[in-house]
Image (cartoon, rainbow, N blue to C red):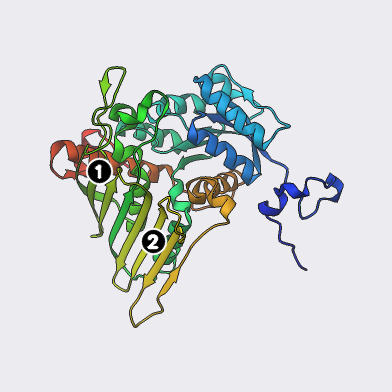
Amino acid sequence: MTKELKTKYISNNPKFDYLPDSDRYLTNSEQPKYRFNIIGCGNMGIEHMRVTMLEGRATIHGVYDPNPKSIDQVKKQFASISPESNLVEYETLTDACNDTDVDGLIICTPNYTHIDIVREAIKSGKHIMLEKPMTTNLEDAYEVVQIAKDYKSIFQIGLQYRYKAIYDEAIHEALERKSLGDIKTISIMEHRVPFLDKVKQWNKFSKYSGGTLVEKCCHYFDLMNLFAQAKPVKVYASGSMAVNFADFEYDGEKSDIIDNAFVTVLYDNGISANFNLCMFSPMFYEELVICGDKGRLKASENEDFLSAKRPRNHLEILRGENKPSKITTPCYPAYIEESGHGGGTYYEHVHFVDNIDGANTPTPSIEEGFWSVVVGIAAEESLKQGKAVLIEDLLRKKEMQI
């Protein structure tokens, strides 16, 4: 028995809009099973809204954000996708969390607000997707771990970089296929433009963001931890505010976030890792290099705004004379890659709905979200102290056991 190919590219293609519903077969869209509310309607809130509608098994029911311009923008974007539907606008966070017509909450507010919103959201018992970083400090991150242990519904952390095509393939090759043998070293690089504007510029101040190495780099520390398959034991970081926001002030307060860093992480299984950050480059470039005792993997993603055409994604595995090597271009359909974070947000949503449906997916756990924050906080502490930070000491001071 054959099964026809049905894709979002076909079902969402407007050139078939002339068809009556009774004549739709390949172009028939699955009706949403779930309704989600967006808490926080900035760039990430809009991205989650668009991806929810693209993925199709859920729809956005309503939105909450105290900033009227954010609400106006998300409504405008929603109308362009679903002109026949209306978003519910909630007056309070409590109302947004406890609407009985809603199945799940997507929390994408500024980092420093996460813990208070989680405390309110869990009262609803609804499924929760919480954007990274889960919190800005260890105490709050530990509280989220404790909350999630006894939470009956899905509680998912937004570490969507795992789902980017290059990292999805790297995970398969390094951890599942064991193409590199035993992993020994891990290196990750991010070179990019500065932090973009946010409402009240919260991402320019460490007390609101957690610091650059928590706010942005928790993604990469999560990947390091994943590939190491071990717990970090020591972190050393150097970095500075070399170019960006050196003269920036908001409400009389000077920005204090770094724009470059080198971070070394040692793991309890002997693996060593390093991270190279530069946030004053005229591009978006990520690179992962993993070396094992049987091979080397390099994966990269590039957006440099040039007219010269070259593949956005690249992955190579070199294994010398003993096994085949390969050079590939991992990618998703263009409409998925363009939906946000190279398609990572889309597949994050696929896993979120799969998890709600009861499937067993390789979604980052709450504990993994915690450890991504731990490495970031340890790196920020190392910068301040000018010396290596032992993770055991960091957690012991807070009387935490994970």
Q: Is residue 16 left or right of residue 163?
A: right
- Residue carrying label 2: 299
Position of 400 relative to 321 (above/below) = above
| Residue ranking furthest to the front | 307
Q: Is residue 80 left or right of residue 27?
A: left
Query: Residue 398: image x %, image y %?
Result: 25, 33
Label 2 crowd bin: few (<14), some (14–19), many (20+), radius 10 Å? many
Q: Is residue 263 visible?
A: yes
**Which residue is located at x 33 percent, y 40 percent?**
373
Q: How many marks?
A: 2
Distance from disc 2 to disc 1, alpha carbons, whole Å, reads 21 Å
- Residue carrying label 1: 260
**Which residue is located at x 66 percent, y 44 percent?**
56
Kind of residue at badge 1: Asn
| Residue ranking furthest to the bottom | 321
**Which residue is located at x 56 percent, y 24 percent?**
71
Query: Residue 24: image x %, image y %?
Result: 81, 50
Label 1 crowd bin: few (<14), some (14–19), many (20+), radius 10 Å? many
Q: Secondary structure at mark 1?
A: strand
Position of 273 relative to 152 (above/below) = below
Q: Is residue 401 visible?
A: no
Kind of residue at badge 2: Ala
Q: Quadrant of residue 51?
A: top right
Q: Please say if the residues under marks 2 and 1 sit with CB atoms less than 8 Å apart.
A: no
Q: Which sits in the foreground, 61 or 300? A: 300
Q: Secondary structure at mark 2?
A: strand
| Residue ranking furthest to the left | 386
Q: Quadrant of residue 7?
A: bottom right
